[in-house]
Image (spheres, grey):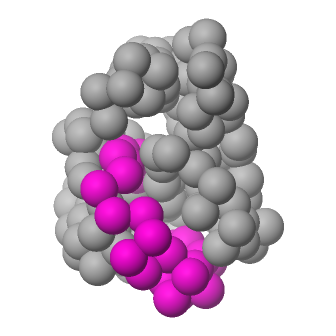
């Protein structure tokens, strides 16, 4: 049986989103028959997208939007992915200072354009960073939130391994 590939693409500036993406990747790596690739958004290329069977997109919410480098990743890969990844599963992780909902909406809209299929509710971790100092400060994601990220990664990997997606 050919192993399935889960691609985890993320951007981080203060470390919070990186912790979340790494936790999702760790959870997915426990699933036999699933290869996990963890890439920063600037490193991820169209061939990485085309070579994956499922995706986790992880972004901070910046000014009520996805991070610019995540948008750049989606833009760079769009034409190569169009009509070539239809129906593949994805899940979203957002590290937000407030509610994170707009970043989720943006990824959902982009994923609709890519013709991907959401297979889990978006996981938003709110850091409550609201001052310039708190926003720029390195983030530490809590144990319970990281456990949820691991569970999301494990569930997506299990679905890939079982052929559910």
Q: Is residue 134 left or right of residue 94?
A: right
Whole-percent x and y of residue 97? 39, 56
Q: Is residue 119 left or right of residue 48?
A: left
Picture layout, residue 130 above or below residue 90: below
Between 150 and 88, the one lying in front of the other is 88
Q: Where does the magenta region start and end?
A: 67-94
Whole-percent x and y of residue 146? 50, 23
Name the residue located 37 percent from the left edge and 52 percent from the top edge: 88
Q: Quadrant of the C terminus?
A: top left
Between 32 and 143, the one lying in front of the other is 32
Using the rendered image of the protein, determine whether residue 147 is visible from the camera's viewpoint.
Answer: yes
Which residue is most to the front?
A: 1
Which residue is most to the right?
A: 43
Name the residue located 65 percent from the left edge and 73 percent from the top edge: 46
Quadrant in the rendering for residue 102: bottom left
Whole-percent x and y of residue 99? 24, 56
Whole-percent x and y of residue 26? 64, 21
Using the rendered image of the protein, determine whether residue 102 is visible from the camera's viewpoint.
Answer: no
Name the residue located 33 percent from the left edge and 64 percent from the top edge: 86
């Amino acid at each position: 049986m050919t192993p399935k590939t889960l691609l985890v693409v993320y951007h981080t500036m203060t470390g919070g989103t990186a912790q979340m993406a790494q936790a999702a990747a760790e959870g997915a790596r426990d699933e036999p028959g699933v290869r996990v690739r963890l890439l920063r958004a600037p490193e991820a290329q169209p061939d990485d997208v085309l070579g994956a069977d499922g995706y986790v997109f992880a972004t901070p919410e910046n000014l009520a939007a996805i991070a610019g480098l995540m948008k750049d990743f989606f833009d760079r890969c769009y034409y190569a992915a169009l009509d070539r990844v239809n129906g593949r599963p994805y899940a979203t992780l957002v590290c937000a200072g407030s509610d994170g909902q707009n970043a989720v909406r943006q990824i959902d809209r982009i994923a609709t354009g890519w013709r991907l299929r959401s297979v889990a509710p978006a996981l938003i971790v709110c850091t409550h960073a609201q001052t310039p100092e708190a926003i720029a400060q390195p983030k530490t994601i809590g144990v319970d939130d990281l456990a949820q990220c691991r569970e999301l990664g494990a569930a997506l990997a299990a679905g890939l391994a079982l052929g559910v997606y």
